[in-house]
Image (cartoon, rainbow, N blue to C red):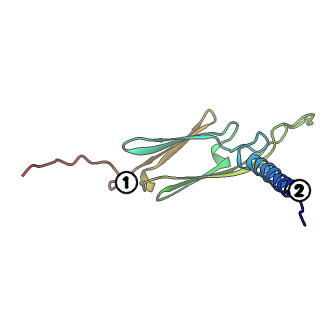
């Protein structure tokens, strides 16, 4: 039982400090850390007629990546495998094998049949044309 206001105040100060530490700890997990980066890093562009996604995938080939497009979602999945060349032994390995999955939700549906993708120089470029309903239209304004 608290008999003094000072003891009461000190208890709540300890709780405040505990909450600040918990917020700081969980905040570090929510932010991207160098140990667990978002992969692949990507840019998403919106043009009048299509969405364009450019994703960095150094050292990967078309066989390593799976691309799925469904209405308004683009999902990029794959696995980066690293093996030393034959006859070599590993002295240091800073790049580890890595499975990844990244989904982009678009604001409008796209034409799945007309979508294209290419991987060149470690950059995956996905072009997903918008559907006819999603394209912007200019509507004429009439006066009475």
| Vertical relation: 103 (above or below) 38 | below
Q: Residue at x 68, y 44 (%)?
A: 39
- Residue 6 is situated, as x and y percent measured from the top left of the image, at 86, 53
Q: Residue at x 64, y 49 (%)?
A: 65
Report the disc number at residue 7: 2
Who is closer to the viewer here, 119 or 71? 71
The residue indicated by pointer 1 is 131
Q: Residue at x 86, y 56 (%)?
A: 11
- Residue 109 is situated, as x and y percent measured from the top left of the image, at 43, 56
- Residue 137 is situated, as x and y percent measured from the top left of the image, at 27, 48
Is 114 left or right of 120, judged from the image as shown? left
Q: Quadrant of residue 59?
A: top right
Tell which residue pokes out farthest to the bottom in this image. 1
Who is closer to the viewer here, 3 or 79? 3
For marks 2 and 1, give the one nearer the viewer: 2
Is 94 left or right of 58, judged from the image as shown? right
Number of numbered discs present?
2
């Amino acid at each position: 039982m608290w008999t003094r206001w000072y003891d009461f105040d000190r208890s709540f100060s300890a709780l405040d400090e505990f909450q600040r530490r918990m917020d700081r700890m969980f905040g570090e997990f929510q932010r991207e850390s160098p140990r667990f980066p978002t992969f692949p890093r990507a840019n998403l562009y919106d043009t009048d007629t299509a969405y364009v996604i450019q994703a960095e995938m150094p050292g990967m080939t078309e066989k390593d990546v799976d691309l799925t497009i469904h209405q308004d979602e683009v999902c990029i999945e794959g696995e980066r495998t690293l093996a030393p060349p034959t006859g070599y032994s590993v002295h240091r390995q800073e790049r580890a094998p890595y499975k990844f999955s990244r989904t982009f939700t678009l604001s409008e549906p796209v034409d799945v049949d007309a979508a294209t993708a290419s991987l060149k120089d470690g950059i995956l470029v996905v072009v997903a044309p918008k559907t006819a309903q999603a394209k912007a239209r200019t509507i004429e304004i009439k006066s009475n």
